[in-house]
Amino acid sequence: MHLIQRSVAAATLVCGLLAAGLAAAGNCPAFYVDGRLPEIRNSKMAAATTELCYGVFGVMHSGVTRTPLWSAEHLTAENVDAAKTLSRENSFHPESRLPASARAELSDYARSGYDRGHMAPNGDMPDRATQHESFTLANMVPQDSEVNRHIWAGIEGVVRKMAQKEGDLYVVTGPAFIGGNLQKVGNVLVPTHLYKLVYSPRQRAGAAFFIENHADAQYELLSIAQLEDKIGINLLPSLTPAQKTVMLRVANVRQRKTGSK
């Protein structure tokens, strides 16, 4: 009898581990390092989340903040080259796959003083279909206009150049909500900070840009481990703690004088 019980327990454990592995892979594993979704450490942050998959990026959307918690891309040199041939066509739209009670609307951003800031940027999109997808409000956060149009645009440009040099990068971009004095525009929570993590599978190294969401802010360059500690998300769960300290060399960011793609 004890042998049967042990066998049943072992089978249950195996099934549980397999289920956990499938859950960790998510619905669009191609956009994540080793196919593994980031792991949210804060139970409050994990509430009301919905995974959304698009042509070249994936989003973990929060019905609490009504923003992405992150947008993830496997950014290739080929996609960057293709994106350069496209003019920008604005097509901001609410995400129809989300219930009205959980999603952002265009009215939330109207006259708010904030830009609708892309997390997976339009300038990474290789064709019109994926460009349109990038304008879903599920991929947007309220972003300070000066940050969005200048230093953040510069960060996006540096990452694209890196992808061309490396051949491909994994990129995870998102908002951070730090502290107790948080604001809203309409029903959408305004992030206090923004981050963009880049990981080179060729060099097995990563780095993260981290910046406050206000005019005149300057970015910090962090290791993966340092960023994860700040935001409470295990962004690259397949890497060891030691691997997350290996810094990828990145170019200095120059501020753009025109709008971000």
Image (spheres, rainbow, N blue to C red):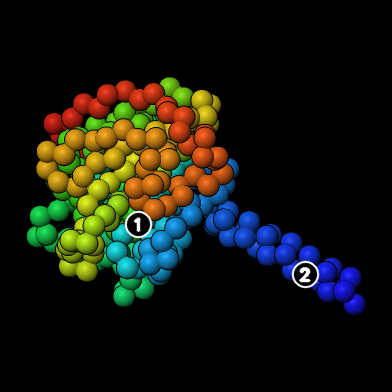
Judging depth in this view, the residue of 94 and 218 nearest the camera is 218
In the rendering, at what x and y percent does residue 156 appear?
Answer: 30, 35
Q: Is residue 25 visible?
A: yes
Circle 1 packing at 10 Å, graded few (<14), some (14-19), many (20+), is many
Instruction: Identify the element where label 1 is drawn.
Output: strand
In the rendering, at what x and y percent does residue 179 appear?
Answer: 23, 57
Q: Against 256, is 234 above or below?
A: below
In the rendering, at what x and y percent does residue 53 appear?
Answer: 47, 55
Residue that protrudes farthest toward the front in the picture: 2
Q: Quadrant of the C terminus?
A: top left
Judging depth in this view, the residue of 237 and 65 nearest the camera is 237
| Residue, disc 1 | 68
Choose the circle earlier in sequence order: 2 or 1. 2
Q: Against 209, is 183 above or below?
A: below
Q: Do the residues labelled 2 and 1 touch (CB within 8 Å)?
A: no
Q: Can residue 156 be seen in this view?
A: no
Q: Quadrant of residue 258?
A: top left
Judging depth in this view, the residue of 56 and 175 nearest the camera is 175
In the rendering, at what x and y percent does residue 29 appear?
Answer: 55, 49
**Mark 2–mark 1 distance (CA, rounded to whole Å):** 38 Å
Circle 2 packing at 10 Å, graded few (<14), some (14-19), many (20+), is few
Residue at 40% x, 46% y is 228
Residue at 83% x, 69% y is 6
Q: What amino acid is labelled 2 in the image?
A: Ala
Q: Against 143, is 98 above or below?
A: below
Taking the image as shown, residue 150 lies to the left or right of residue 56, namely left
Instruction: Identify the element where label 2 is drawn.
Output: helix
Q: In which quarter of the image is residue 81?
A: top left
Residue at 40% x, 70% y is 48
Q: Against 188, is 196 above or below?
A: above
Judging depth in this view, the residue of 9 and 206 nearest the camera is 9
Q: Quadrant of the N terminus?
A: bottom right
